[in-house]
Image (tube, rainbow, N blue to C red):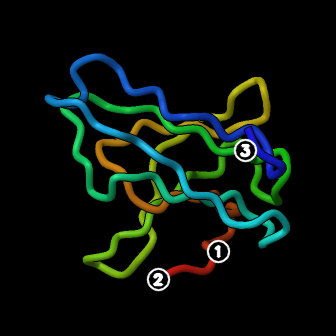
Amino acid sequence: TNARGAFVLPNVPAGAVDRSTRFAILLPPPGQGDRAFAEFLPHNQEFAVPVTIRLPYAITDAQPGAPITWWSQSGKWWVDQPSAATADGRIEAQVDHFSFYGTRSRSGITIAGG
């Protein structure tokens, strides 16, 4: 958890990786924008089974049900992921790799990146 809300370590289930792996989340400084945003490391770590990540929406202008989106470095665009609101004020998505992830409003992507 940090000053920006209820960020938690991703839920990495058994069998997601085939060797010991160190995971990290880099967060922007508090007060940097109205979207939840985090860099999940290691970049492009692929998972054999889906990993659940959670981002807060309660402290942002994203709405429950708004998608989590990730930055495709190869395509240079944001890609929406199916997501669901949780009872504790977060949006969660199951992902197959790590990258930059953030929330967005329903009307379009408004977070900066790239």
Q: The disc labelled 3 sits on which kind of residue?
A: Pro
Measured as percent of width and height from the top left, residue 16 is found at 25, 28
Where does the image place residue 93, in percent across and percent down from the top left? 49, 39
Mark closer to the observer (1, 2): 2
Left or right: residue 44 versus residue 57 is left
Q: Which mark is residue 56?
A: 3
Tell me whether the residue at label 1 lies in contact with that at label 3, contact meaning CB atoms closer than 8 angstroms.
Answer: no
**Residue at the left extreme, as displayed:** 18
Residue 52, position as x, y percentages in the image: 46, 32
Identify the image quadrant of residue 34: bottom right
Q: Circle 2 sits in a helix, a strand or a loop, which is it?
A: loop
Q: Which residue is pictured at 46% across the width and 83% down the height?
A: 114
> Where 85 falls versus 31 (above or below)?
above
Q: Is residue 30 left or right of residue 109?
A: right
Q: In what quadrant of the picture does the N terminus appear? A: top right
Q: Can you say whether 31 is above or below 59 in the image? A: below
Question: From mark 1 to mark 3, how far is it between C-alphas?
Answer: 15 Å
- Judging depth in this view, the residue of 96 and 44 nearest the camera is 44
| Label 1 to label 2: alpha-carbon separation | 10 Å
Position of residue 41 measured from the top left corner of the image (x, y, whole percent) = 40, 52
Q: Which amino acid does label 1 sit on?
A: Ile
What number is the disc on residue 111?
1
- Mark 2: amino acid: Gly
- Residue 114 is labelled as 2
